[in-house]
Image (cartoon, coloured by chain):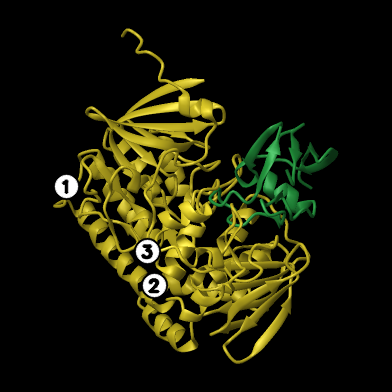
Chain colours: A yellow, B green
Amino acid sequence: MVETLRADVAVVGGGPAGVAATCRAAEAGARVVLIDEGLAPGGQIHRHLPGEQPPPKARPWLERLRRSGARLVPSAAVFDAERDGSTWLLRAAKGDSVLFIRTSRLVLATGARELFLPFPGWTLPGVIGAGAAQSLIKSGANFRGKRAVVAGTGPLLLAAAAGLAEAGAEVAFVAEQASWARLARFAADALRTPARLFEGVRYRLASARAPYRAGFWVKAAGGAGRVERAHVTDGRLKLEVACDLLCVGFGLVPNFEMARLIGCATEGSGVASGDGQETNVADVFAAGEVCGIAGVEAAVAEGEIAGLAAAGALRPDLPGVRRLISSRAKARRFGRRMAEAFRLRPELLRLAAPDTIVCRCEDVPLERLAAARSMREAKLETRSGMGPCQGRVCGAALEAIRKLGPDTVRIPLVPVPLEALAAEEAREEPP
Amino acid sequence: MRETVAIRVDGRTVAVPRGVTVAAALLGLGIEAFRTSVAGEPRGPLCGMGICFECRVSIDGLSHQRACLTLCRDGMDVVTRG
């Protein structure tokens, strides 16, 4: 089935930034369509199953979304975006339907994904992302009786450990790669933002029975056909921890594929945006983690500002807007402090052995990528990045460990059936 | 106890909790290898959020479906290791 939706503002991504942008734009009178790949709005942080209660923190925004009059399109993946005269034309696949979305303005709130660093054994079943552990738990997975090791960096590790413990797993070890000294500096900083410190403490308490070690990282995973042990080190000690789940979280990287497809400039790791969250491309705004990793509070503030701006209702002199701008600045400062505290140690970028697979779609080991000077060369010579994930996993890994820049983004942004690519917009019906 | 739905996994009919994703259901059944890689290795979910495509399975005859983004439906036919 083919359908065309028309909007003043189309928001891509239904996480905190996208939901905030949608609410603000719709409340300002714009006709808004929110397209989200998830089963229900809320993004990864507020992921919940359709028909189930969303987490308490998400409820006020999701209730506001319901009342906003915006049209919500869940389970839909945008696979193309292009200028068509005075409008933007998006194409999205939803089940076996194709949606054409014609919109005057576009808000990109495509969020972030986990950065995966290759290490020996990381392709074994049972090695999953720390965020993945949370997503799977929120999707109904039962980890009762599992023995889990959580390794990597950042507050997400504690959140994952707490989530796993609540889901019935025994958390055998939490390895935070940052040193105690860095953590102590960060904690002292976080005192200025008590809400976050409380969160941190709450997670710590929930997983208190799990040994939490700073300055430790995972070197390798072992097992026959599935993960059975994690090799953990602080550079001197070498520990072998038996486990049937190894959850790794090395930080997040922005999902900037769509932004790059339509020509948005990037700054640092994210999409560059101005005071009103506008990008360098006319009528395109960006909000949330796609602009750089700064956490949920920055995402909400940016989303609200982007929504107002996209609806033509951003008036910087209004007190409410001034508050948003100041909370955005504060949240971004916190994001920068966090990035500094949890910066990856160089040892983590050298974990992969020559025969460690880097591109999991095409099974390309590191040694075959040794000569590649760019992602393009890697693709042409090894097919790395040409599988279904389109380099979202290996591209980010190679950028981290080999400093290879990303290749040009091509459509379709996600794999879709040929029929979806070939689908044509239904002819205009007479008014 | 949660309500269940009946799905078929590799030809075997099993009861799984209603409303959960296929990825959650398979993990709950003790299945960790969802697909076989091009070099013949077993692979299972990695990102849990639709990015990595490691959890892809065949669902009702359609190949390459992301188990982490698909809800279990009564009578659904899931084939792993394709």
Residue A104: x and y in percent read 26, 32
Residue at point 33% right, 50% down? Answer: A303
Q: Nearer the viewer, mark 3 or mark 2?
A: 2
Answer with mark 3 or mark 2, whichever residue precedes in sequence. 3
Q: Residue A294 — which label? A: 3
Considering every residue shown, the one lying at the far left of the view is A317
Considering every residue shown, the one lying at the far bottom of the view is A236
Residue B20: x and y in percent read 68, 44
Vertical arrangement, residue A365 with respect to residue B25, above or below: below
Answer with mark 2 or mark 1, whichever residue precedes in sequence. 1
Labels 3, 2: one chain:
yes
Secondary structure beneath dot 3 equals: loop
Residue A64, quarter of picture: top left
Please name the residue that numbered disc 1 is placed on: A315
Query: Pointer 3 indicates a residue of which chain?
Result: A
Give the spatial CA distance, label 3 vs label 2. Answer: 8 Å
Q: Residues within 10 Å of mark 3 (few under 14, many from 20)?
A: many
Are dots 3 and 1 in contact, CB under 8 Å? Answer: no
Query: Pointer 2 indicates a residue of which chain?
Result: A
Q: Residue A339 — which label? A: 2
